Image (cartoon, rainbow, N blue to C red):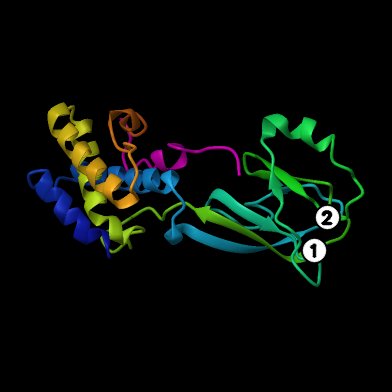
Amino acid sequence: MTYRVLKEQIIRNLGGRTDEDSLNSVKACFNFVQKLIARDGEWEELEATKSITFTSGQADYDYVADWGITDLMKIYTIKIWDGSRFRPPLSYILPSKWDDEIATIPQTSNYPTCYTKWGAVLSFYPKPASSYTGSVLRYYKYPTPVEDDDSIITFPDLDHILVAATTGYFWAGLEETEISAYWFRLANAYYKTWTKSNRYLFGFEAYSKIKERSASRGEYWADPFQKEGG
């Protein structure tokens, strides 16, 4: 499914607004909603696998510069290939507990047994005693932002949720509180039915993340729900 299909539905919800500012706002809100949904669960559409290499004696790796991973949102598992089999998955340790935790781990292992994440840097302990190619990092990636009408939607099965939530955030940007609240209620009802949860995902709290941003500036994509951790 392409963005064009859903954009046309959203425009109808906005009374037919097709000026450039409105279209840019719709696109920014739509991309934000996709990212908000992505952060809320573990979606098959976002699963990714990367073959990685550990270098002998090297504990820290920039996953962008060293391994070419540019879309990492959340790490699922890391496994080291020792040449004959995969070692058990590495354990994740919170950065705030890293120093205390590794102080209790023996340094005798030839393989890292745990890791933490400092921004784009992954630190492993103990340091690898050899180079291990063919190791694997499985992760959840960020949804691909739509750029034009032919862009493919990351969550095609959630089309009614995407339309309602995007409409809500657009009206919130115009401070149309009652109208946006209606669309948020509708989007949350759809989402709760789909996920079988009782949580409200869409609303005015999240709107503060995209206020005064537009798709043409591209700023919102860099920061709304950036989190540290595995």
**What's under tag 2, amino acid-wise?**
Tyr
What x and y, as percent, mark residue 116?
Answer: 69, 41
Residue placed most toward the observer, 218 or 1: 1
Residue where numbered disc 2 is placed: 111
Q: Nearer the viewer, mark 1 or mark 2?
A: 2
Query: What's the residue at 42%, 48% (across, down)?
Result: 38
Residue holding disc 1: 132
Which quadrant of the view contains residue 44?
bottom left
Q: Is residue 222 magenta?
A: yes
Q: Position of residue 72 (x, y in %)?
A: 55, 51
Disc 2 packing (10 Å; few <14; some 14–19; many ≥20): many
Q: From what the image shows, is residue 97 above or below residue 70? A: above
Magenta span dominant secondary structure: loop
Q: Residue at point 8% right, 47% down?
A: 16
Residue 155 is situated, as x and y percent measured from the top left of the image, at 34, 58
In this view, 143 is above or below 39: below
Q: Would you identify the image quadrant in which residue 86 lies? A: bottom right
Q: Between marks 1 and 2, how big is the CA–CA gap? A: 9 Å
Region of the chain picked out in magenta, as a range: 211-230
Amino acid on which the number 1 mark rests in the picture: Tyr
Image quadrant holding the C terminus, namely: top right
Residue lying at 44% horizontally and 48% vertically, measured from the top left: 41
Residue at image coords 21%, 32%? 172
